[in-house]
Amino acid sequence: MVYSKMDLSSRVALVTGGGTGLGKGAAEGLRAAGARVVIMGRREDVLRKAAEDIGAEAIVGDVVDKANVENVIAQIAEKFGRLDILVNAAGINLRGDSFEYSEDQWDHVHAINAKGTFLCCQAAGRVMRSAGYGKIINIASLASEIGFPRIVAYASSKGGVRQLTKALAVEWAPFGIRVNGIEPGWFRTELTEPLFHDEEWVKKITSRIPMGYAGKPEDLQGAIVFLASRMSDYITGELIRVDGGALAG
Ligand SMILES: NC(=O)c1ccc[n+]([C@@H]2O[C@H](COP(=O)([O-])OP(=O)(O)OC[C@H]3O[C@@H](n4cnc5c(N)ncnc54)[C@H](OP(=O)(O)O)[C@@H]3O)[C@@H](O)[C@H]2O)c1
């Protein structure tokens, strides 16, 4: 280990949405830094396969279901005796014209992205409060900050994630719990796969990224490990953009 403050070998982490995409990349990064990692998601087969790849444990669960979330956190606390790190990567996007957007679509996106993130923070935060230490990393989005067409509920829910991150950071700092976030730019994952089949779209977004390419899940790992480790103990309520410079200009 180059620098002991980066070492997560005494830490236990939960990554929601850890079976695929950015959550899986985050889980791999935390494992590489030494943490014991639990991944959570709804599809058991996807989760088990990812857990095997990563060397993590899998617990099937739905972030929208409060009792389910509390049960998952209780299982982790019981098995490992601690929970130091929570990464909230579970999320969805339902694209559509806002004139036609349905109430069900709106509620569903907010339930997973905003309420689900809060429920996981709340249940994990209680365990962290007892320990006097914890690191929460919420995956927000560039859409937390700027507007894009046809994703009105996603933008609203991710704006909510940005603000709940700041609200909890202030409320929970006295308990030693740091609450930060990451705003990824464009990454190729299950969520965005259909867009990456559209050559015009790829050309357009690539031209907006000074680094000149879309991100891969491993591109998020530096920020994840940094925010999960003691390196970032004096940082809370911050959201780091990992976007190849997209919002810099
Ligand atoms: N890809 C990008 O360019 C990008 C950019 C900005 C932000 N993000 C954010 O990054 C996060 C990860 O997305 P991704 O791009 O990696 O897409 P992804 O591969 O589709 O990952 C989303 C994960 O969330 C899980 N999930 C969804 N609903 C859930 C629920 N109710 N309970 C538990 N788990 C649930 C999914 O697993 P199950 O379906 O098995 O539950 C899946 O593993 C999301 O919050 C997304 O908004 C992505």
Image (tube, rainbow, N blue to C red):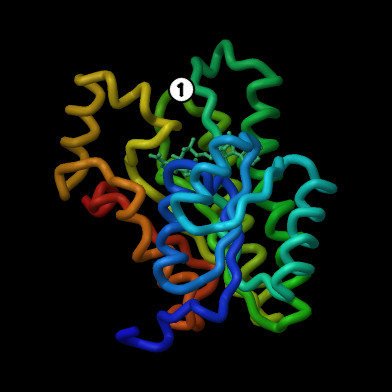
Q: In the visual, does 135 lie left or right of 150?
A: right
**Could you say where residue 52 lies in the image, as x and y percent from the top left?**
50, 50
Residue 215 appears in the picture as rendered: yes
User: Are there few (<14), some (14-19), or many (20+) residues within 10 Å of tag 1?
Assistant: some
* Foreground pick, 37 / 156: 37
- Quarter of image, res 110: top right
Taking the spot 16% from the left edge, 48% from the top edge, the residue there is 210
Vertical comparison of 98 with 206: above or below: above
Q: In the visual, does 20 lie left or right of 206?
A: right
- Quarter of image, res 232: bottom left
Vertical comparison of 245 with 178: above or below: above
* Numbered marks: total: 1
Assign the N terminus to one quadrant of the image.
Answer: bottom left
Q: Which residue is mark 1?
A: 150
Taking the spot 53% from the left edge, 73% from the top edge, the residue there is 236
Vertical comparison of 147 with 48: above or below: above
